[in-house]
Image (cartoon, rainbow, N blue to C red):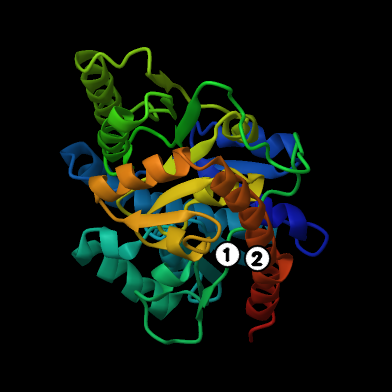
Amino acid sequence: MRNATGQLRGQFIFEYIVPTGSTARAVLERDGYAVHELPFVEISRRKEDVLRYFPLLLLNSWRLRQLVRRQGASMVHLNDFYNLTGYVAKAFSLGKLRLVTHVRFLPQSLPQPLARTWRWLAERFADRVVCVSQAVRSYFSEAEKVQVVFDPIPETEQYPVAVVPILRHPTTVELLYLSNYIPGKGQDLALAAFKKAYVYNKQLRLSFIGGDMGMPRNREFREQLEREVQQDGLKQIVSFGSFVTDVEKAMKAADIVLNFSEAESFSLTCLDALYFGIPLIASDCGGPAELFENGGSGILVPNRDVGSMAEAIITLADDPQKRTQFAAASRIFVRQKFSPEATYLRLGRLYATVLTKQ
């Protein structure tokens, strides 16, 4: 959202509301945005979250309604499909509050009783529903209010290159997996595929980079991967890093970017790799299939198919010329498909339509 709103600040005034204690506040304030905090609670299976969820939903919705009135805001944009505060705040306003809902998750991958409820609320009460991909859009009805607006590509490159070099490293082929350590994000599939590919090509190296978001389940997932690497004697071949802020630098140190997530509504990681010209191998898990041309600017492999993943790694690692071709083609493709007209300018027109609605 920050990439999109940054391009529209000459037309609209934006203020952000983030969860209490969010590290996003400092980033947004550095960009000059007014930032407010509310103690949002996500619904989960934990009993304490369930007990807190509905009272805080009502309280946060009332606070949101009051904040909207105090700041003179005309519209609320919910940047999460499952954030219901906007709907309740709209009820408190007797339907006067204008509401845009952004769907960034792949609803097909969510628990369906919840996903269908959120879909009904969005189609019934939001003025517009924004989907980040056609894969997400396919979950909804044909209602005109449901529209696809792609996420913007990065504005600039800090380390521009005229042509991506054929070989970044003289003796190794560096694979990068850039994603938070979350079950379902595909690191386990990538490791399994890498081990198969490494049998055929000892030049391969794999780096995982990401955070655990402070969640025990994610930390355990990373530790499980590290134990597997240790047991297989690959500690000098496979490395694990933490969250990085300079994504471009991390990607441009790699020869190939992998993304084998089991469900993605869009995948900014894939978009960044394509934009920066890093050859990409991604799973056919939703949104990534829309980001590039399979075989022309990247390789798309069947979802959860470790054998196909390994084969793609072997093929691309053995063909530096193909990597160079992919790098050049992907840079052109994403700049054309994710132009301002398809991204932030489209979002700006959507805002203007909602704000002029009587």
Question: What quarter of the picture does the C terminus occupy?
Answer: bottom right
Q: Residue 313 location, x and y as percent?
A: 39, 41
Coordinates of residue 266 in the picture (x, y in percent): 47, 58
The residue drawn where x is 48% and y is 65% is 290
Q: Residues within 10 Å of mark 2 (few under 14, many from 20)?
A: many
Q: Position of residue 254 (x, y in %)?
A: 55, 32
Q: Which amino acid is tagged 2? A: Thr
Asked if the residue under mark 1 is in contact with the one under mark 2, i.e. CB atoms within 8 Å, the reply is: yes
Does residue 245 sit above or below 145 in this rendering?
A: above
Name the residue beneath numbered marker 2: 343
* In this picture, residue 155 sits left or right of residue 204: right
* 48 w.r.t. 271: above or below: above
Question: What kind of residue is marked 1?
Answer: Phe
Q: Is residue 344 left or right of residue 61?
A: right
Q: Quadrant of residue 205?
A: top left
Give the mark nearest the N terminus, 2 or 1.
Answer: 1
Dot 1: element: loop
- Decide if residue 273 is in sight here: no
Residue at position x 43%, y 66% in the image: 87
Task: Measuring from the top left, give residue 121's x and y in whole percent.
Answer: 36, 72
Number of residues whose C-alpha sits closer than 10 Å to that of mark 1, classed few (under 14), some (14–19) or many (20 or more): many
| Camera-side residue of 315 and 176 | 315
Side of 45 where 8 appears, left or right: right
- Residue, disc 1: 150
Q: CA distance from mark 2 to mark 1?
A: 5 Å
Residue situated in front as seen by the camera: 162 or 210: 162
